[in-house]
Image (spheres, coloured by chain):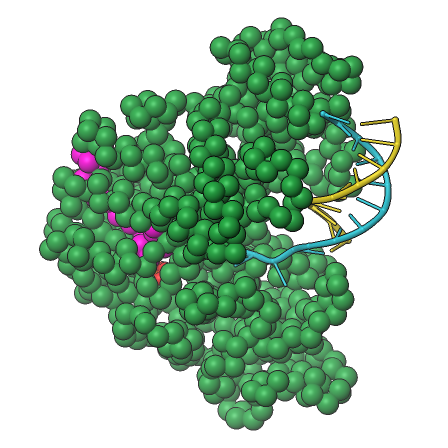
Chain colours: A green, B cyan, C yellow
Amino acid sequence: MAKLDFKNELNREQYEVVTAGKGPHLVLAGAGSGKTRTLTYRAAWLVDQGVKPEKILLLTFTNKAANEMIERVRSLLGIGEKSKFPLWGGTFHSVANRLLRIYGKEIGIRPDFTILDSDDSSKLLKTISKEFFGSISEKNKPSPALLRETISFSNNSKISIEDSLEQKFPEWMPLLEYFEKIAAEYHRRKKESNVLDFDDLLLFWKILTEHPQVGKVLANKWEYILVDEYQDTNIIQAEIIFNLSKGHKNILAVGDDAQSIYSFRAADIRNILEFPDKFKNCKVHKLETNYRSTPEILKLANQIIAANGNQFEKNLKAVKDNHVRPELLALRSNFEEAWFIADRIDQLIDRGMNPKNIAVLFRASHHSQSLEMELNKKGIAYEMRGGLRFFERAHIKDVLAYLKVLGNFRDEVAWVRILEMYEGIGPVTAKQIYQRLMEMASIDELVDFKLDLAAKAGNSWSKILDVLSRLIKDKEKNVGKMLNVIIDKYSDYLSSKYTDYRQRHDDLDQLVIFSSEYDELELFLHEISLQESFSGRQASKENKENVVLSTVHQAKGLEWDAVFVISMTDQSFPHPLCVREEEREEERRLFYVAATRAQKYLYLTYPMSMFRYDGHKSLKPSPFIIDLDSNLFQHNDLSRSVTYASSDGVEYEPDPDYHDSNDDGDDGFLPDISNW
DNA sequence: TCTCCCTTTTTTTTT
DNA sequence: AAAAGGGAGA
Ligand SMILES: Nc1ncnc2c1ncn2[C@@H]1O[C@H](COP(=O)(O)OP(=O)(O)OP(=O)(O)O)[C@@H](O)[C@H]1O
């Protein structure tokens, strides 16, 4: 392979960062300026300079991003797929997961802990809440999700339950004492169950870095630490980074304050703004060239973000040639919007665009519903990102619960989940059984564990024992085969509980295919809980070529030739619950992130009415759109006819001959949305 | 204590 | 439309 030509692949500022010396560096730069590229080349450069890959830690926002970056580093360096390349990469949570299984013993964490996802946490909190509140009606006590958010926010921002509650849900302050008691009990129960929730992964990692011996080990474990999307880290994460780099201070953080969109889960913009104070002698770098988008798109994006006060001044210049302006389109209903988008996607594909270079973005995952139907109708394959993950689906979790108790028999949530699936066993009996089971010293004692139960419950218990004993005795190692034993018994329950059981069964089949690649239960359990989907190992290769439907949050850091941002209404974007000024500014940043994903084509659309379970609702365009200059948009026949139709009741006919006109000499009519 | 059936509510983003 | 809560009877 030809020697890597770093100079040629990067601009001067990027090159400076990539080849910078030791010590702390911060890159604070706008969207599409090549921050991620710089980080990737930095990793490659370090290895090229002789740094061992295992001495580099790369922290990213999703595991997918980490894997892609590591692959890119590999290919830059010409390292084949078969050779080892042990660079550490992943999200904070997944790295914590790995480290805690190695070093956790020192702080009282067993290596076989299982992980609670947010649904599991809610379930445990619901049980605890019932114990504390007794039979007070549901209306007068906080929901499990609310409890979870309060506790989680307090963990992630290092504040008390009191402050967290005051900030997030002040209306519940009268019940503060309950919140505190429940939080304490929740903590105790997790410990007893040998489980960690997402927050614990970070908290205990931080505690590890403060441990007298392990802390030293970790501070020397890596020589270079690279962090992407630093604007969306929280206080705990910043402390982890600080402690890890105590010895060498070789840290490179990149981010953009204008793209901070996770404050709802305690991400704190001060991390990036105060980075230079925290790391003395830190060099701050700026990148001011946008390589991603056309000047027209960038101009629109800049105006979107300009409406926010309070931000780091950035000067972004586009290098791409002029192209078409973004389009703003009003459609009459969410169905028409879906029809229009699907049609336009069809046209783009017909004109030769690769479907994988097209994305549809939205504020909330359910906004994609009508569009999904329309795409199915047209036979356009798509990949959905955001919303419920594969491993969070109820039926997947049902069958995984059996594996979880085999891996960690103390897991209360998993046990209760299994037990309550059976006839005659409800919350009370489940809890009793769980308590008796904790007399066991290991899962092997389960095989002949006798219980005194009522007839129905007793019958159910023997069914449960049946499945689990078989798994214990068989000593089958392949996870796929183990799952088959479980699914065999689970099928009847599945079809009796769900009307869409066929589809759910397909999911289970997919799970079996995926899990057949694992011959070690522990490894399987450790890996799945933090996996975004299972594209990492296997699943569908064809998915890679499909149109992407994604929440804006999930689209962070990515880019496509053509981007549609749909459902830009006052009821969806900004989200109606975001009323405080900081919240609205964050929503605007989210809009900025959405718009800056586009390379060539950007479409903003909104339906003027929507059908919901409670009937028909008419909608206004998003206030973010009204704020924008209309001459930033391209006009075309469609927007004209649609708007006319809405204002004077003229019947609107979708124009089958409609084609995107690239020349835009038409200075005519724009949807008049100023006085709705 | 569990289950079944009727009533009420549902409004976001994620590791 | 679907999920979750609430209450009555077994
Ligand atoms: N020096 C360069 N020469 C050519 N292309 C570049 C250069 N730097 C960046 N790019 C391209 O610009 C695009 C955006 O880069 P990248 O994703 O790294 O930006 P970013 O700053 O991380 O964006 P975001 O803030 O949206 O995450 C990529 O397609 C990248 O390959």
Residue A48 appears in view: no
The reply, left or right, for residue A65 in relation to residue A521 is left
Residue under the image location 44 percent in, 54 percent down: A166
Residue under the image location 40 percent in, 71 percent down: A293
Q: Nearer the viewer, residue A178 or A355?
A: A178
Q: Which residues are magenta?
A: A217-234
Look at the image and say whether residue A221 sits in the magenta stretch.
yes
* A336 in relation to A252, above or below: below
Q: Nearer the viewer, residue A526 or A179?
A: A179
Counting from the top left corner in percent of width and height, residue A423 is at 75, 24
Look at the image and say whether residue A84 sits in the magenta stretch.
no
Counting from the top left corner in percent of width and height, residue A464 is at 67, 18
Q: Quadrant of ligand 1?
A: bottom left
Query: For the view shown, which residue lies furthest in the bottom direction?
Result: A668
Counting from the top left corner in percent of width and height, residue A26 is at 22, 57
Q: Nearer the viewer, residue A116 or A17?
A: A116
Residue under the image location 34 percent in, 46 percent down: A158
Counting from the top left corner in percent of width and height, residue A203 is at 35, 38
